[in-house]
Image (cartoon, helix red, strand yellow):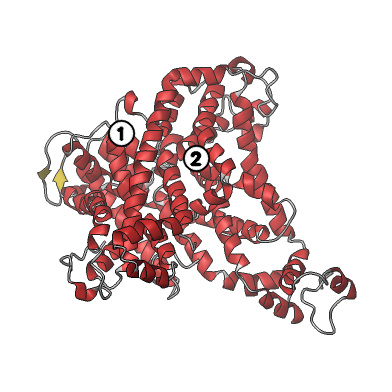
């Protein structure tokens, strides 16, 4: 984050004629963001060069945290798991949300009912969702045992690849409705005349989808993908409650790695290194996706839909 | 290729469709025409996903009314044969009233100040757009949107300790306010920008100060956006987990998501009771959802267009 710090320009020449500077209206918000946003951001960089156990005093130790973390095989593993969660959850959610979003943009009779139920997962806390699925998937008293269906009766969270797939499935369970809603809004803004022209040209349904709907949704797809990708860096609570990073380190994403090193292992220095990496990954992804978005969203990554 | 064509294009219009839709506006006709064709792929995806979403939800509610003994060995999807409130009693006796109050304090204590200071900042940013300091402030808020805030938790923890706020509700509230500001300012400034300039001008001619204009003109006019932003932030804070986990310690300061987690650790085997705790912590949100679904949905997509 760049923090340009120009001195408060109280000169009325820069304000509309006859109007006083409104700078101080923004000060309360600015103070909060500086104390709990800017200072911590500088803080993680500073702390990454120190030793701190979370209780005692902080002392500088140069580059040793960085050396430790970079040579620790756990770090690339966490980076890889984070990437897997990000890529796979994007791959699962995007086609599903697109399909449902296009469908919801129509005027089917049951659409309202569908919409009411779809959004309930968005209201639940990640902790509640994780707890529910943990109980539901329990090999001893979960759904599989109760129904007596062998296929469902597995140690879902006990095996690495399986646990990772479950995390991705639950993320989709939580967020597919949200992204469907974004796509629904996007589809509704496509001019009907485009479809009419295509039909006159004899384009079929599938052709229309790929030649009109998808290109017209370009900015919606970028918005939704940005939220998915940057959001996937913050799946801390879900994974923490569901698997705590396990089995082993199969689901130990960066955010979890940071927490476990810092608050469980009392190694705040190395944890800060992970935090710096997390911020860098998040920022570069946001910038990359914004570049893909072209000139449409010049204000923020959340606009443009 | 499809049974019905869309627009009444000359020469190709099927007579039945034209008669049927004579009374509708062209726009409506077009929309109906386009959507008459059943989107089978979309429909199957939507209904399949409904099942995926609804089944666990049904299971949560149904199971929360079952006795622990009858839960084992019975079909988990069957409705409770003899519904009981025993699980709910256990949850409430486990101090959930206190956690509920804590969560309410944290949510209100965050949302009200966060929305007010964000509104003030948004007003200044829109009304004094040529001010370089305010432009830089706005840039800072926008940059904040791209940062995964969890990453800053370690210094936040250090700051909270130094402020002697560790293990208090204020420790959760203060950073939550800061984290809520960037998106709130973005959404609110988009709305304030839409207020016609003439209104501000006439307020000024009437001798109103900027302060009065802000509260008497802008505040009521952007009320829908204020509600939207409050709901979004309220939900985020109500469901927040990391800040309470890191910044508090004692059970008396516990908020609901954290309480759910510890309750599950304690009663993990008692599935019906665990699910009753899930239901109880979600009820206030569901009530809000039932009361203002539209507001809530726009709140959930706050910042994505408007």
Residue B78 is drawn in which quadrant? top right
Label 2 environment density (alpha carbons within 10 Å; few <14, some 14–19, many ≥20)? many
Identify the disc placed on residue A23.
none
Q: Looking at the image, which is closer to me, A122 or B52?
A: A122
According to the picture, the residue beneath numbered tag 2 turns out to be A163
Label 2: which secondary element = helix
| Residue at the image position 84 percent from the left and 81 percent from the top | B12
Q: Looking at the image, which is closer to me, B221 or B116?
A: B221
Decide if residue B206 is on the left or right side of residue B29: left
Q: Percent position (x, y) of residue B6?
A: 77, 73
Q: Looking at the image, which is closer to me, B67 or A158?
A: B67
Do pointers 2 and 1 mark residues of a single chain? no
Residue found at the far front of this picture: B206
When the figure is inspected, residue B83 is found, relative to residue B229, above or below; the finding is above
According to the picture, the residue beneath numbered tag 1 turns out to be B169
| Residue at the image position 51 percent from the left and 35 percent from the top | B284
Decide if residue A135 is on the left or right side of residue B143: right
Decide if residue B177 is on the left or right side of residue A21: right
When the figure is inspected, residue A99 is found, relative to residue B9, above or below; the finding is above
Q: Which chain does the numbered disc 2 sit on?
A: A
Quarter in which the N terminus of chain A is drawn: bottom left
When the figure is inspected, residue B67 is found, relative to residue A185, above or below; the finding is above
Residue found at the far bottom of this picture: B11
Q: Percent position (x, y) of residue A5?
A: 18, 64
Label 1: which secondary element = helix
Q: Nearer the viewer, mark 2 or mark 1?
A: 1
Q: Percent position (x, y) of residue B161?
A: 19, 36
């Amino acid at each position: 984050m760049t923090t340009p710090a120009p001195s408060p320009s109280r000169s009325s020449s820069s304000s509309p004629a006859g109007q006083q500077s409104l700078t101080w209206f923004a000060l309360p918000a600015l103070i909060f963001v500086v104390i709990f946003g800017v200072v911590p951001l500088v803080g993680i960089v500073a702390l990454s060069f120190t030793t701190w156990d979370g209780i005692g005093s902080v002392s500088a130790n140069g580059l040793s945290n960085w050396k430790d973390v970079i040579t620790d095989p756990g770090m690339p593993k966490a980076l890889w798991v984070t990437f897997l969660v990000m890529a796979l959850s994007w791959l699962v959610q995007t086609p599903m949300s697109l399909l449902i979003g296009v469908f919801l943009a129509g005027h089917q009779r049951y659409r309202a009912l569908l919409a009411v139920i779809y959004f309930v997962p968005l209201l639940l806390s990640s902790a509640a969702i994780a707890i529910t699925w943990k109980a539901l998937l329990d090999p001893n008293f979960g759904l599989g045992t109760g129904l007596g269906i062998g296929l469902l009766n597995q140690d879902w969270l006990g095996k690495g690849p399986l646990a990772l797939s479950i995390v991705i499935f639950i993320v989709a369970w939580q967020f597919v409705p949200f992204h469907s809603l974004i796509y629904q809004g996007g589809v509704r803004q496509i001019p009907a005349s485009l479809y009419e022209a295509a039909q006159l040209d004899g384009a079929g349904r599938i052709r229309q989808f790929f030649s009109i709907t998808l290109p017209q949704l370009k900015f919606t797809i970028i918005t939704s993908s940005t939220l998915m990708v940057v959001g996937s860096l913050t799946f801390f609570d879900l994974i923490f409650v569901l698997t705590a990073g396990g089995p082993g380190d199969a689901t130990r994403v960066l955010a979890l790695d940071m927490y476990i090193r810092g608050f469980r292992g009392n190694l705040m220095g190395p944890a800060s290194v992970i935090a710096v990496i997390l911020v860098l990954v998040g920022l570069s992804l946001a910038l990359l996706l914004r570049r893909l978005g072209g000139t449409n969203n010049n204000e923020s990554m959340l606009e443009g839909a | 290729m499809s049974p019905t064509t869309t627009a009444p294009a000359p020469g190709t219009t099927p007579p039945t469709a034209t008669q049927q839709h004579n009374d509708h506006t062209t726009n409506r006709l077009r929309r109906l025409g386009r959507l008459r064709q059943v989107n089978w792929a979309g429909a199957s995806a939507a209904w399949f996903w409904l099942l995926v979403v609804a089944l666990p939800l049904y299971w949560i509610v149904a199971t929360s009314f079952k006795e622990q003994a009858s839960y084992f060995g019975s079909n988990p999807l069957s409705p409770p044969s003899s519904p009981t409130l025993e699980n709910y009693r256990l949850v409430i006796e486990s101090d959930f009233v206190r956690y509920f109050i804590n969560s309410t304090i944290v949510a209100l204590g965050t949302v009200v100040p966060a929305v007010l200071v964000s509104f003030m900042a948004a007003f200044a940013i829109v009304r004094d757009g040529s001010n370089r300091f305010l432009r830089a402030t706005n840039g800072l808020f926008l940059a904040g949107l791209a940062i995964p805030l969890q990453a800053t938790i370690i210094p936040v923890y250090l700051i909270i300790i130094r402020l002697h706020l560790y293990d208090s509700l204020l420790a959760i509230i203060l950073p939550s306010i800061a984290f809520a500001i960037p998106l709130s300012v973005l959404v609110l400034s988009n709305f304030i920008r839409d207020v016609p300039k003439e209104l501000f001008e006439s307020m000024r001619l009437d001798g109103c100060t900027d302060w009065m204009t802000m509260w008497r003109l802008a505040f009521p006019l952007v009320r829908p956006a204020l509600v939207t932003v409050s709901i979004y932030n309220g939900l985020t804070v109500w469901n927040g987990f990391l800040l309470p986990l890191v910044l508090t310690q004692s059970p008396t300061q516990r908020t609901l998501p954290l309480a759910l987690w510890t309750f599950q650790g304690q009663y993990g085997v008692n599935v019906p009771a665990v699910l009753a705790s899930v239901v109880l912590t979600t009820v206030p949100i569901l009530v809000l959802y039932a009361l203002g679904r539209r507001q809530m949905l726009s709140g959930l997509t706050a910042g994505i267009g408007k």
